[in-house]
Amino acid sequence: MKRIGVLGAGSWGTALAVHLAGAGGHAVALWARHPQLAERLAAERENRDYLPGIEIPRGVEPTAEMAALAGCEVVLVVVPSHGFRAVLRQFLATAGGGCESGDPAGPGGHRPLVLVSATKGIETDTLARMSQVAAEETAAAGRPLRFAALAGPSFAAELARNVPSAVVIASADAALATEIREALSTPAMRLYSSADVVGVELGGATKNVIAIAAGTVSGLGLGHNTLAALITRGLHEITRLGVACGGQPRTFAGLAGLGDLVLTCTGALSRNRRAGMEVAAGVSLAQITGGPMVAEGIRNSVAIARLAARHGVEMPITEQMVAVLHQGKDPRRALEELMTRGLKAETEL
């Protein structure tokens, strides 16, 4: 059993805490940004705001104090990408030095911080992946870091109910990927290890934009032909960008690529797919983004389009979704332009 810290008490953070404490038998400290939420979670043993109907086991300790995560062997960061840097910086300033990895102390006498990112997105201003943000912030704080990224097809509500799921843990540190894989796998959550951090992170970020497009297609009442074409060509876009940034092509045929893409594009529990359906229904962007649940693909669409431009990568579906979401373009017009683009060989990346 490990003592695990989870930064972020949204639906995914709560689900991971519930699963790791219940099915995994770990002791989990679950940090919530707002003290009132932490108090309700502790009193009611349910996260009515983000994961209603799921009992929080006694092995989960809700808290609004980051210092309560000091001494955790592993810390999962499960916050939206636009808040990742600020939360990590706050953690490093209050509790980061107390997290033990079992390794010899590094620079400054601190043991390495074992950090697992379960955030799917890239930073809007810098276009940095979460691994890059973590490296920057820990270096600035003088803390040695062992980093891994967690991704794959996994709805929070299903994982919290112990529905069998498979995800991938990626780290440039092969020993850490194996260690996390062995420690956090349960009979209902099977972890596969990978060395491709770039591919796993970008697969998780870019699929959200394609999922909004998939929801838009479904909301317009178009058929399975259209949806299948969108998912397939969307995977080409994801792969092109991932490879250009240093990812491995095979990663995008795996759990963090095709697996997560199919789930998010077709599953009724997908926030990004639901956002696309609302777009098709004429709901304003302000209304779509006004609730507590975050559809990462809305904000990340612009960042991903900018990242693609930086690397000279063509991403027509993403570009059209930026125009639809942020420039008021009619979705049917966007679809027409995608269908009438210049013809090409399918194998072209």
Image (cartoon, grey):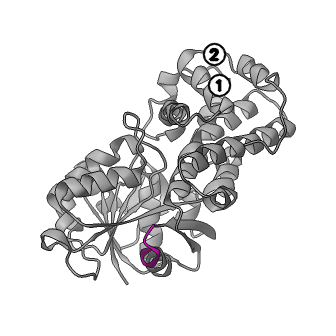
Residue neighbourhood size for the residue with mark 1, other residues' Cα within 10 Å, grouped as few (<14), some (14–19), many (≥20): many
What residue sits 57% from the left and 25% below the top?
Answer: 322
Q: Are discs 1 and 2 less than 8 Å apart at CB?
A: yes
Q: Amino acid at mark 2?
A: Lys
Residue type at the position of mark 1: Gln
C-alpha separation, residue under disc 1 versus residue under disc 2: 8 Å
Vertical placement of 159 versus 276: above or below? below
Q: Which residue is mark 2?
A: 329
| Quarter assignment of residue 144 | bottom left
What number is the disc on residue 204? none
Q: Nearer the viewer, residue 34 or 107?
A: 107
Frontmost residue, 341 versus 76 = 341
Furthest-left residue in this view? 108
Front residue of 4 and 93 = 93
Q: Nearer the viewer, mark 1 or mark 2?
A: 1
Point out which mark residue 320 bears: 1
Horizontal and vertical percent position of residue 41: 33, 58
Q: What residue do we see at 47% from left, 23% from top?
A: 286
Residue 183 place in picture, x, y as percent:
45, 80
Percent position (x, y) of residue 54? 49, 61
Residue 325, located in which quarter of the rendered image?
top right
Q: Which residues are magenta?
A: 171-176
Whether residue 330 sits left or right of residue 23 in the image: it is right
